[in-house]
Amino acid sequence: MSYTIDYSDEAKQDLKGFNKSQENQIIKSIRKVAQNPLPQNEGGYGKPLGNKRGRNLTGYLKIKFKKLGVRVVYRLIRTETTMQIIVIAARSDDEVYDITAKRIK
């Protein structure tokens, strides 16, 4: 079952920061993940985030696109089968998770 993809307004802005080729690759990859966005422990692609260094990101998942050097943080709204994209960034782990913590408040 494929999940509906919902980009937060901030994530839409994040995408605009990449060149068109990168943007297309990211969107294509997100669509692939949307086919099975469940956590890895449930057989999906997402790696669960938790409570680290004062940032409580429990309930959120990440996917890393190593070739692009990009991380995407999202959450699943299982009652609606929606994959909500929170952050798309080519940044270090700590910076991506700081941005996520700010956006979910």
Image (cartoon, rainbow, N blue to C red):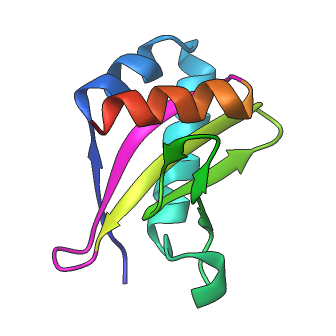
Residue 102, given in percent of the width and then of the height, sits at 38, 28
Picture quadrant where residue 2 is located: bottom left
Q: Is residue 64 left or right of residue 14?
A: right
**Residue under the image location 33 percent in, 31 percent down:** 103
Is residue 85 inside the magenta stretch?
Answer: yes
Quadrant in which the C terminus is drawn: top left
Magenta-colored stretch includes residue 37: no
Range covered by the magenta-colored residues: 78-91
Which residue is depicted at the point 53% across and 28% down? 98
Q: Position of residue 11 (x, y in %)?
A: 37, 29
Q: Residue at x 56, y 15 (%)?
A: 18
Give the residue furthest to the front: 54
Horizontal relation, residue 20 to residue 8: left or right: right
> How far across and down, in percent of the image, does residue 100 sit?
45, 35
| Image quadrant assignment for residue 76 | bottom left
* 16 or 56: nearer the viewer: 56
Q: Residue at x 43, y 14 (%)?
A: 16
Q: As drawn, which residue projects farthest toward the right?
A: 67
